[in-house]
Image (tube, rainbow, N blue to C red):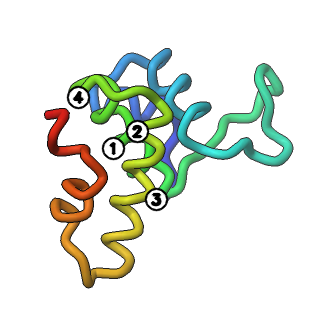
């Protein structure tokens, strides 16, 4: 399943300008797709999840983009390993102390 930035914006009620900014911040550059080339970037499910989680971290929790990227990696690593709990790992990183 793939989703475009405009579909993401409508689905999660986030302004399109913020979605585009967050895509640039949280995802690596796409090959062959650049600003104003006329090709719409389609996000995979994993990419959309990363942008959504990053948006929550930045908008609702007030983290910087660098901190949000770090915590996105922690969340995906924890989900992939399934051995550690996300909350425990975030606590060791000092994330829960900020909230």
Q: Earlier in the sequence, mark 1 or mark 4?
A: 1
Residue matched to label 3: 46
The quadrant the C terminus occupies is top left
Q: Nearer the viewer, mark 2 or mark 3?
A: 2
Q: Earlier in the sequence, mark 2 or mark 3?
A: 3
Q: Earlier in the sequence, mark 1 or mark 3?
A: 3
Relative to residue 43, is residue 68 depicted above or below? above
Question: Badges 2 and 1: C-beta atoms under 8 Å apart?
Answer: yes
Residue matched to label 4: 61
Residue matched to label 1: 53
Residue matched to label 2: 68
Q: Residues within 10 Å of mark 2 (few under 14, many from 20)?
A: many
Q: Residue at x 25, y 46 (%)?
A: 94
Q: Going by the image, does 89 lie left or right of 4? A: left
Relative to residue 20, is residue 92 depicted above or below? below
Spatial CA span between label 2 and label 4: 10 Å
| Residue 81 occupies quadrant | bottom left
Spatial CA span between label 2 and label 3: 16 Å
Q: Earlier in the sequence, mark 2 or mark 1?
A: 1
Q: Residue at x 23, y 28 (%)?
A: 61
Q: Residue at x 50, y 52 (%)?
A: 47
Secondary structure of the residue carrying numbered label 3: helix
Secondary structure of the residue carrying numbered label 4: loop
Question: Badges 3 and 4: C-beta atoms under 8 Å apart?
Answer: no
Spatial CA span between label 1 and label 4: 11 Å
Q: Earlier in the sequence, mark 3 or mark 4?
A: 3
Relative to residue 7, is residue 73 depicted above or below? below
Residue 8 numbered mark, or none: none
Q: Going by the image, does 65 lie left or right of 82? A: right
């Amino acid at each position: 399943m793939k989703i475009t930035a405009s579909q993401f914006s409508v689905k999660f009620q986030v302004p399109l300008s913020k979605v585009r900014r967050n895509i640039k911040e949280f995802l690596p550059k796409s090959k062959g797709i650049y600003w104003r080339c006329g090709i719409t970037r389609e996000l995979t499910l994993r990419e959309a999840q990363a942008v959504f989680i990053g948006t929550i971290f930045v908008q609702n929790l007030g983290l910087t983009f660098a901190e949000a990227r770090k915590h996105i990696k922690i969340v995906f690593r924890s989900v992939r390993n399934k051995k550690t709990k996300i909350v425990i790992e975030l606590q060791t990183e000092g994330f829960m102390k900020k909230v």
